[in-house]
Image (cartoon, rainbow, N blue to C red):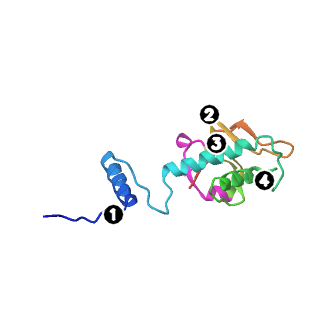
Amino acid sequence: MTVRMHTPNLLARTGTVAALTLVTLGGTTITPGTTGGAEAASVSAHALRVAASKRGSPYQYGAQGPDAFDCSGLTLYSFLRAGRALPRTAAAQYSRTRHVPAGARRRGDLVFFHSANGIYHVGIYAGNGRMWHAPKAGSTVRLERIWSPGVWYGRVR
């Protein structure tokens, strides 16, 4: 007796095997249309590299690159090059991020400075208590120590 089996294409078999392996090993799968942790980390890492590549670019109020930036213009430009669109202002960017406590911050998270009047500055966390940012008129994009303990962090989704 000969048994004939329908053999699915290689891509389908590979996908099934990969999914079964993940389940067996306790991994997670990513549903199409959602952002997995690894993908989000990759986007943030790319945005961080873009911001660092702009070291020395002049601050200009309202500028969004590629040659001059204000603070939210630098974050907008960096994440756009990494594949994520952000709103224009620091306050609007804060509203569009997943808020994370300082103890859970990661490289590539946004750093928001605030006062009683609201959010007034944003940068990209670079690790070791430092961030890339476009500080103020007369300065340039640079890596600098975060000078205030009272900042908020947001993770771009």
Q: Tell me whether the residue at label 1 lies in contact with that at label 2, contact meaning CB atoms closer than 8 angstroms.
A: no
Residue 140 on the magenta span = no
Is the residue under label 3 in contact with that under label 2 (CB below 8 Å)?
Answer: no
- Name the residue tied to disc 1: 8
The residue identified by callout 2 is: 128
Instruction: Name which residue type carries label 3.
Output: Tyr
Please determine whether, in this image, residue 131 is positioned above or below residue 2.
above
* Residue at the image point whose x is 39% and y is 51% from the top: 28
Magenta residues, as a range?
92-107
Tell me the kind of residue under disc 1.
Answer: Pro
Question: Disc 4 to disc 1, how far (Cα)?
Answer: 49 Å
Q: Which residue is mark 4?
A: 65
- What x and y, as percent, mark residue 4? 22, 65
Q: Nearer the viewer, mark 4 or mark 1?
A: 1
| Residue 131 left/right relative to 30 | right
Q: Residue furthest right?
A: 138
Q: What is the CA distance from the residue labelled 2 to the residue labelled 4? A: 26 Å
Give the foreground label among 3 and 4.
4
Residue 24, given in percent of the width and then of the height, sits at 30, 48
Disc 3 target residue: 125
Residue sitting nearer the eye, 52 or 70: 52
Q: Secondary structure at mark 1?
A: loop
Circle 4: residue type:
Gly
Estimate how packed mark 1 is, as few (under 14), some (14 to 19) or many (20 or more) residues with alpha carbons within 10 Å.
few
- Give 14 or 113, whichever is nearer the viewer: 14
Q: Is residue 118 visible?
A: no
Please name the residue shown 68% across and 61% down the image. Answer: 87
Q: Residue at x 30, y 63 (%)?
A: 7
Q: SS of the residue at dot 3?
A: strand
Looking at the rendered structure, the kind of residue marked 2 is Asn
